[in-house]
Amino acid sequence: MNQDPEDPLLLDHEADGIRELDNNLPRWWVWLFVLCTVFAVGYLVHYHVLKAGPLQAAEYQAEAARGDALKSAALARFESDLSSLKPLTEPGVLQQGRQAFVNLCAPCHREDGGGLVGPNLCDEVWIHGSNYVDTVKVILNGVTEKGMLSWRGVLKPAEIQAVASHIHTLRGSNPPDPKPPEDPSRPAVPMDFE
């Protein structure tokens, strides 16, 4: 393209009344482009040609495996100490347990624990044991034959203990229109409030 003799930076190319300006890119932009290109070539050679480093997918899998190992170790420590657990009474923990119960458990047990699809958690009939440790075990392991999910790996041990502590506070309460006992012919398991 020819340049305009009046202004050597203006080319004779025109579109919609706009004339093209022939100026150089800023030096910093050119050097940034060159450095990015050099980095990209180096990255390609290092990771894809020479395979000298792990790719992102492999790094993610290694980190996920480390995280799973940490989670499994924490759950193993928690499960080994189950027999010594006692219900927590701190208001903040009970509020956290209540919030988790409302979000996760209320669709089956109602917000007040009176029972819907799942059993009533307020009466004296407990199918899977009535003490606090039994409640923790049910939350942790679930009851698949009854449709209760296992919250192992979903909830942290402290969250499981908070939910179980909240459930412990529901025992003996009288919600309106509660679900009747699951198996009336089965004798009630005495409630253990320890």
Image (tube, rainbow, N blue to C red):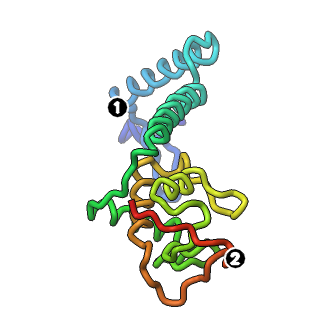
Q: Please identify the quadrant where the C terminus is shown.
A: bottom left
Q: Residue at x 51, y 68 (%)?
A: 190
Please say whether residue 2 is visible from this viewpoint: no
Q: Residue furthest bottom?
A: 177
Residue 39: where, in percent of width, then height? 47, 20
Residue 38 seen in the current view: yes
Where is residue 8, by image quadrant?
top left
Identify the mark at residue 103; answer none if there is no mark: none
Q: Residue at x 40, y 64 (%)?
A: 193
Earlier along the polypeptide chain: callout 1 or callout 2?
1
Numbered label attached to residue 26? 1
**Amino acid type of the residue that numbered disc 2 sits on in the rendered structure:** Ser
Which percent across, then down, holds residue 152?
Answer: 55, 48
Q: Secondary structure at mark 1?
A: loop
| Label 1: how many Cα within 10 Å (few below 14, some 14–19, many 20+) | few
Q: Quadrant of the N terminus?
A: top right
Q: Is residue 86 rendered to the left or right of residue 190?
A: left
Q: Secondary structure at mark 2?
A: loop
- The residue beneath circle 2 is 185
Is residue 104 placed above or below 77 in the rendered structure? Answer: below
State the image coordinates of residue 133 (x, y, percent, origin top left).
47, 53
Is 96 displayed left or right of 137 in the figure? left
Foreground disc of the pair 1, 2: 2
| Distance Cα–Cα, label 1 vs label 2 | 87 Å
Query: Dot 2 surroundings within 10 Å: few (below 14), some, or many (20 or more)?
Result: few
Q: Residue at x 39, y 35 (%)?
A: 23
Q: How many marks?
A: 2
| Farthest right residue in view | 145
For image coordinates 51% across by 63% down, the residue present is: 130
Q: Nearer the viewer, residue 95 or 20?
A: 95
